[in-house]
Amino acid sequence: PSSTMAREELMEGLDPVDLLVRCQLAKSRGEARRFVDQGGLYVNNERVGAEDRVGVEHALHGRYLVVRRGRRDLHLVVIG
């Protein structure tokens, strides 16, 4: 699965919980918060914690974010 996100949304950084919900990798903010707190969120194969912000600086080639929840659930975010 993939989605598109505006570059402006990522300029100041996006909360990892919001990212999981927007990518539909979590059904609710509570579930997303549990995944983040348990260390199950990765952006481009780097673990993201609750205190981190996901921004443009994390993007591959300045354009792609590969969001992974756990081992198998992947989502591609194309920054437009």
Image (spheres, grey):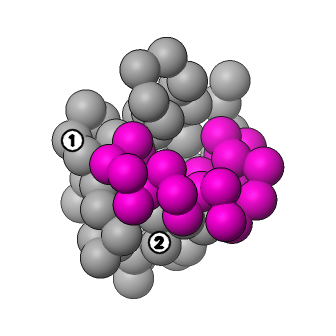
Q: Dot 1: what SS?
A: strand
Give the Cα separation between the discs numbered 2 and 1.
16 Å
Residue 50 lies, with reference to residue 58, above or below; the image says below
Please state which amino acid type lies under the numbered disc 2: Leu
Q: Quadrant of residue 70?
A: top left
Residue 67 seen in render? yes
Residue 18 lies, with reference to residue 12, above or below; the image says above
Image location (x, y in percent) of residue 11: 40, 76
Viewer-nearest of discs 2 and 1: 1
Image location (x, y in percent) of residue 22: 70, 55
Residue 29 lies, with reference to residue 62, above or below; the image says below
Q: Which residues are magenta?
A: 20-41
Relative horizontal placement of residue 10, taking residue 1 as reference (left or right): left
Examine the structure image and report whether residue 32 is included in the region drawn in magenta: yes
Mark 2 neighbour class, 10 Å CA radius: few under 14, some 14 to 19, many 20 or more: some
Residue at x 68% of width, y 47% of height:
26
Image location (x, y in percent) of residue 35: 49, 50
Residue named by callout 1: 46
Residue at x 41% of width, y 20% of height:
71
Please state which amino acid type lies under the numbered disc 1: Glu
Residue 60 seen in render? no
Q: Residue furthest right?
A: 27
Q: Dot 2: what SS?
A: loop
Instruction: Decide which of tag 2 and tag 1 comes sooner along the chain.
Output: 2
Examine the structure image and report whether residue 62 is included in the region drawn in magenta: no
Residue at x 69% of width, y 66% of height:
29
Residue named by callout 2: 14
Q: Quadrant of residue 40?
A: top left
> Of 79 and 26, which appears nearest the observer?
26
Residue at x 46% of width, y 63% of height:
16
Q: Quadrant of residue 9?
A: bottom right
Mark 1 neighbour class, 10 Å CA radius: few under 14, some 14 to 19, many 20 or more: few
